[in-house]
Image: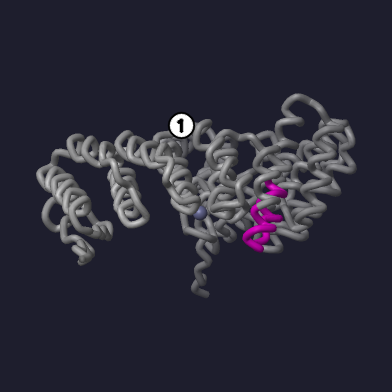
Amino acid sequence: MEFALLFLLLPVAALSGWLGAKISVRRNSNPGAKLSSQYLAGLNFLLNEQPDKAVELFVKMIEVDSETVETHLALGSLFRRRGEVDRAIRIHQNLIARPNLTQRHRMQSLYELSLDYTSAGVLDRAESLFLELVSLNSHMGESLRHLIDIYERERDWNKAIEAAQKYQLIARQSMQATVAHYHCELAELALKHNQVDRAQRYIKRAMAIDPRNVRGQILQGQNMIAQGQYKAAIRCFLRVKNRMPAFTAEIVALLGHCYEATQQLQHFKVFLKQCFQEGLGIQVLTALPERFYTVLEDTITYPDIMCHLKERPSMRGLYTILSIRVQRVQGTLHDDIAYLMQVLQPLLNKETPYSCEHCGYSVSTLYWHCPSCRHWGTMKPYSGLKISVAA
Ligand SMILES: [Zn+2]
């Protein structure tokens, strides 16, 4: 005779915050009756907040069949979600050690154990288990997704590229924009070590994979500077400004450096003038190195700059204008402006001119990898609040 004793959607969360998982226990004749009483005892331990005794009991259960294994998996997952990773690991390791486990349940247990290790921060073990799952053609999409996350955390960009390329085949989801950023990361590393040829190869790959990648364009210019090819670098930076004007602030200092190195500051003036004419003035102003303030003053009148600031209010813009002015005046006015700058200083970091298009996270510095949602290339400069100016 067989009848089922179901613990469906146990309201344990309401009782103690313990169980939110769906647990089913099937009771057979005599052996089943023993099994059921063991489960009930285990659940009782859980309800009485004695998780170690419950884990001990579940791990020692002799019979784990296709019915009861689901309960073990649910419990393991529950422990992990509650942050009790050691207990989750114990349950899942115990399951994997059972010789009578079906292939499906063995793979599921392996996957759960990989998640346990990920939660515990034991990334090398998590990585090897996810790789094992991929090699066994099981949980491939999820495992590759986790592997990508691990490689990003470890900044192992070559492995990240490999995993992302496999993932996009399995999941049929383009990872090209992300892979282009991995190549940019490698290019930045090469540039840091002055390996310009190596950097060039990575940049070329990044641009071939995602021609719209603005980071690749900027890196290309930086790599040209590293090789002393300032004119080529200028072309790269102007391309950034023309194709992706929102990122103009990112290239202002670099462009100024190139014009300075080639003694073409008159061209830099033309560039600055165009930026103000095109509504990019305040962006440029906030990113302009101090040594170019005189170039700016030769190009744009002070009232003009103030007018642009009024249209696009910016704390940093105001601070920059004060920084310019304080150098030009003396006496009480100088002291007053210097005092105002001191007042403004702590407020500058509260201005967050960059925000993620995916999750809305705002920061004061541009990150190519959003620190919040971990998407790549979704953070964009915020052009400032456009307000209408009364006539
Ligand atoms: Zn984000």
Task: Examine the rendered structure and indicate whether residue 8 appears above or below residue 81.
Answer: below
User: Few, some or many C-alpha atoms within 10 Å of disc 1 (few <14, some 14-19, many ≥20)?
Assistant: few
Horizontally, residue 271 falls left or right of residue 347, namely: right
Viewer can see residue 387? yes
Q: Secondary structure at mark 1?
A: loop
Please name the amino acid that badge 1 sits on. Answer: Val
Give the percent coordinates (x, y) of residue 48: 10, 44
Instruction: Please state which of residues 224 and 289 is positioned toward the viewer in this rendering.
Output: 224
The residue carrying mark 1 is 122
Instruction: Please state which of residues 102 and 74 is positioned toward the viewer in this rendering.
Output: 102
Membership of 174 in magenta stretch: yes
User: Is the CB–ligand 1 distance for label 1 below 8 Å?
Assistant: no
Give the percent coordinates (x, y) of residue 288: 65, 42
Report the colour scheme.
one colour
Instruction: Please state which of residues 253 and 306 is positioned toward the viewer in this rendering.
Output: 253
Give the percent coordinates (x, y) of residue 96: 43, 40
Looking at the rendering, in which quadrant would you find the N terminus? bottom left
Instruction: Please state which of residues 259 and 149 is positioned toward the viewer in this rendering.
Output: 149
Q: State the residue lying farthest toward the top.
A: 193
Give the percent coordinates (x, y) of residue 201: 84, 39
Task: Examine the rendered structure and indicate whether residue 76 appears above or below residue 191.
Answer: below
> What residue lies at 56% left-to-right and 50% top-to-bottom?
145
Horizontally, residue 158 falls left or right of residue 237, namely: left
Q: Which residues are magenta?
A: 167-181
